[in-house]
Amino acid sequence: MKLFAIALFALVATASVRTQPAPAPAPVYVVLWFDEEDYILPQDDDATLRLAQLLTKLDVRATFKIVGEKARVLEQRRRTDVIAALKRHEIGYHSNTHSQQPTVAVYLQNAGWENGSAEFYRREMAGVRDIQRIFGVTPSCYGQPGSSWAPQTYPALRRMGIRMYLDEADHVGIDDQPFYSARLLNVFKMRSNLARMELAGGNSLPEGKARFTAAYEKLRAQGGGTISIYYHPSEWVHAEFWDGVNFSHGANPPRDQWKLPRTRPAAETETAFGDFEAYIQFIKTQPGVRFVTANEMTHLFEDQAGTHEFVKDDLVGIARKTQQEITFQRFDGYALSAADAFVLLTGAMASYLPKQQWPATIALTDVYGPAQGFSASVGGVRKSTKKSIWRRVCSGPPTRRPRFVIWLFTIAPFGTISVSPVRVWIAV
Ligand SMILES: [Zn+2]
């Protein structure tokens, strides 16, 4: 009987395996984006038009991150054809004036968190407003001009209604795949999953296909993932970057002294367009590939942490992981930053202590982490006096003013931030 039961189970199991449909191929998302930034070389407008129309013909929606000044220049040159062609795609933001000084990283280099974020908003919101006026949409994403990354941009971008950081540089990244930072979805530092075909003719196309295939096959084997591809429309027509010839090494010439970059021979431009069309068509034919825009990515990779209801078991798990290491934590469907863990655990504690009862659920609220840097106090610590003085600091008010000097040297190793005579006085 037992044997029969096993045999029957085996039969049923086999049958159920046989009747199951084949698993869907692991999706590979391809985000194709352009930095639309050259507001000096007029041929860039034509290259943009041709690219936007080509991609529409191929039924691929790309994301064009537009510089505020480029949008204004298109309007001034009355390139309504270019604006209309771009509107068929998704519109992102690429700063107000890009490489004119001071750039983002320069004007934020000595700024704090809150005043830096306010300064970025003040300087860059003008470009967002012009894009809203000219293109009729709020940009879906932002990417820094050049290497001008700064952390204070994140809260300001959210204030602007921008939901994604889309760029490629080495500043922040996790495992060459999309991630959340400061409540913004990031496609950034994609490295091995960046598949950019060169536009140099010759072997550009076969080498580009090989580079894409390497990333594609690796991601398929891992159960899917994201590939990032970026260009500047000006690359089809220029021989050197517009900002390189005008704003390198801190140069900031007035507008009437701006120089036009050198252009490519027409035949090279034609080859580059031909290769690019073949490259996009090749990608389209790969099983499981789906071209996505920045906005589509924010839906595909929606931040589940913001809507998750954290219960006691979640919180205990978070507390245990925090004890092992203060870093981000991954869970099924969402991830938490160290600051998220901090705000959840302190929220639970504040709720628990008065009634000795766990809250039914706790929701995550926005927190960015420490808003001020820590500056170590100058001077050293005399070990022999450290404990006794700390005890006195904690146990009662000082009796003589000169003790301030000693406390300044003493409190820092215990982690007090921004020790100053006034704060020490108040603290004790
Ligand atoms: Zn750029």
Image (spheres, rainbow, N blue to C red):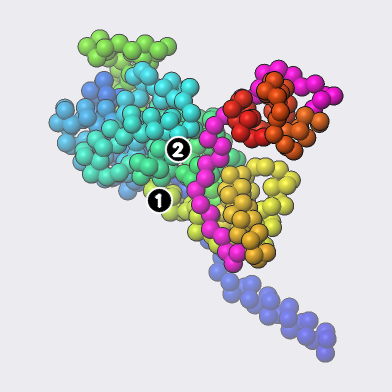
Q: Quadrant of residue 408?
A: top right
User: Does the rendering let one see residue 224?
Assistant: yes
User: Does the rendering let one see residue 233?
Assistant: no
Q: Which residue is mark 2?
A: 154
Secondary structure predominantly adopted by residues drawn in magenta: loop
Which quadrant of the rendered structure holds the N terminus? bottom right
Q: Amino acid at mark 1?
A: Glu
**Residue reaching furthest to the bottom:** 1
Q: Is residue 411 left or right of residue 239?
A: right
**Looking at the image, residue 39 lies above or below residue 27:** above
Which region is colored magenta? 359-386
Q: Quadrant of residue 421?
A: top right
Q: Which residue is mark 1?
A: 296
In-front residue for pair 338/146: 338
**Residue reaching furthest to the front:** 399
Q: Are marks 1 and 2 in contact (CB under 8 Å)?
A: no
The mark tally for this picture is 2
Q: Amino acid at mark 2?
A: Tyr
Q: Classify mark 1: helix, strand or loop.
A: helix
How far across and down, in percent of the image, does residue 88 sit?
Answer: 26, 45
